[in-house]
Image (cartoon, rainbow, N blue to C red):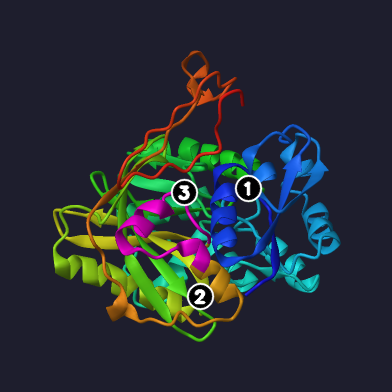
């Protein structure tokens, strides 16, 4: 196990990682921008280093500053958490080049799954069901029109390099396709620096069901059950629960097997999530993307399986085998996660925490609160 790791993140996920590290006796190095000096993760870590000003590109997204901080503090590895650089293949490679272990999958896996069209083709080749759509990205409007005619309307134009609903447009008729394609490409270019898009058939009433996976460096991959993340707003998840309600055992087993098969095909290592759209009327599911990191909703899986996913990430990165097989994973009970968002309704519900005058988290048995808030923050 590592002696000391740097956490390239802030907020609740940084605190979450610190908690597991403390249990394992691993020292932690927190990083913070100059406006986050009073954040809880700074106080909770063994050491803390200021890496830049407020702007994330000059601090939490500054790869050189993060690697320098890790080397200066004697950290052996970097945990990216989620967001920021968690799914950045170049950063994972930069860590390796600097002699630091990136606590996550290989750069190759991140890059392959990060490009949505490539990921879809890879999973299809591994025998994982995919939504009917274009074979990779569409080069121009004429190509998009040919694909649309083949798969029919309604359909989705989706950014190949992104997620979170950015660079995505619903198209209900041929007349709407030119503008939707242009707008999706513009948004994708602005958000991801890549305007490539692909097309998929739109499943109007599908549920969003995802499978938590773990892979080690010894070729073993297991599924830790599934989560339902269908309750969303603006393509952002709000409520997640595990296990997904209303699925027959055969469907659950097929979902898990498909996720494991796809991850095994790419030699996946670390924690990850394979996401599907589930058509309840047909009991059919289709791969949509893979997140090559720990996810915000990971606590519901931990609650029903008793497996600490951050601990497993650390163990896998240190070269340890999982030490258990698929048959050893048991799901008990049910867990629901609610994401509590501080927003300004007068500004279109944009994130805005403001000043927290008082903070009283709930308590009691079987309840868990992951937060970095405190009174006065």
Taking the spot 72% from the left edge, 69% from the top edge, the residue there is 93
Residue 359, percent across and down?
49, 26
Within the image, what quadrant is residue 251 found in?
bottom left
Taking the spot 76% from the left edge, 66% from the top edge, the residue there is 94
Residue 109, percent across and down?
56, 71
- Toward the viewer: 36 or 22? 22
- Name above or below for residue 375 compared with residue 61: above
Residue 123: in magenta span: no
Q: Identify the mark at residue 296; answer none if there is no mark.
A: 3
Q: Give, as a single range, the part of the protein colored magenta.
A: 293-311
Circle 2 sits on which residue? 268
Residue 172, percent across and down?
32, 39
- Toward the viewer: 242 or 355? 355
Label 1 sits on a secondary structure element that is helix
Verify CB contact (< 8 Å) between mark 2 and mark 1: no
Residue 118 visible? The answer is no
Label 2 sits on a secondary structure element that is loop
Taking the spot 82% from the left edge, 41% from the top edge, the residue there is 52
Label 3 sits on a secondary structure element that is loop
- Name above or below for residue 223 compared with residue 44: below
Circle 1 sits on which residue? 192
Residue 8 visible? The answer is yes
Residue 300: in magenta span: yes
């Amino acid at each position: 196990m590592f002696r000391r790791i740097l956490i390239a993140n802030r907020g609740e996920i940084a605190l979450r990682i610190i908690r597991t590290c403390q249990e394992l006796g691993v020292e932690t190095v927190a990083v913070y921008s100059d406006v986050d000096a009073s954040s809880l993760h700074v106080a909770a870590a063994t050491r803390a280093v200021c890496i830049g000003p407020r702007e994330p590109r000059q601090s939490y997204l500054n790869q050189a500053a993060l690697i320098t901080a890790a080397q200066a503090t004697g950290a052996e590895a970097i945990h990216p958490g989620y967001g920021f650089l968690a799914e950045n293949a170049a950063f994972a490679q930069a860590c390796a080049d600097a002699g630091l272990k990136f606590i996550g999958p290989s750069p190759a896996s991140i890059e392959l799954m990060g490009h949505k069209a490539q990921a879809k083709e890879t999973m299809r080749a591994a025998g994982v069901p995919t939504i009917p759509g274009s074979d990779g990205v569409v080069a121009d409007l004429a190509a998009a029109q040919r694909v649309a005619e083949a798969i029919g309307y309604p359909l989705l134009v989706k950014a190949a390099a992104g997620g979170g609903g950015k660079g995505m447009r619903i198209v209900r008729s041929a007349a709407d396709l030119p503008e939707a394609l242009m707008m999706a490409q513009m948004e994708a270019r602005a958000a991801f620096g890549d305007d490539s898009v692909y097309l998929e058939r739109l499943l109007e009433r599908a549920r969003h069901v995802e499978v938590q996976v773990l892979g080690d460096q010894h070729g073993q991959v297991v599924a830790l059950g599934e989560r339902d993340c269908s309750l969303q707003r603006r393509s952002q998840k709000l409520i997640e629960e595990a296990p997904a309600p209303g699925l027959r055992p055969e469907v659950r087993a097929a979902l898990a097997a498909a996720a494991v098969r796809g991850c095994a095909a790419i030699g996946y290592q670390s924690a990850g999530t394979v996401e599907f759209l589930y058509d309840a009327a047909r009991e059919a599911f289709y791969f949509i993307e893979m997140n090559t990191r720990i996810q915000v909703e990971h606590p519901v899986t931990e609650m029903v399986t008793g497996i600490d996913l951050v601990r497993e990430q650390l163990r896998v990165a240190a070269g340890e085998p999982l030490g258990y097989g698929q048959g050893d994973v048991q799901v008990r009970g049910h867990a629901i996660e609610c994401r509590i968002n501080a927003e300004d309704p007068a500004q279109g519900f944009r994130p805005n925490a403001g000043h927290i005058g008082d903070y009283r988290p709930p308590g009691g048995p079987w309840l868990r609160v992951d937060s970095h808030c405190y009174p006065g923050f």
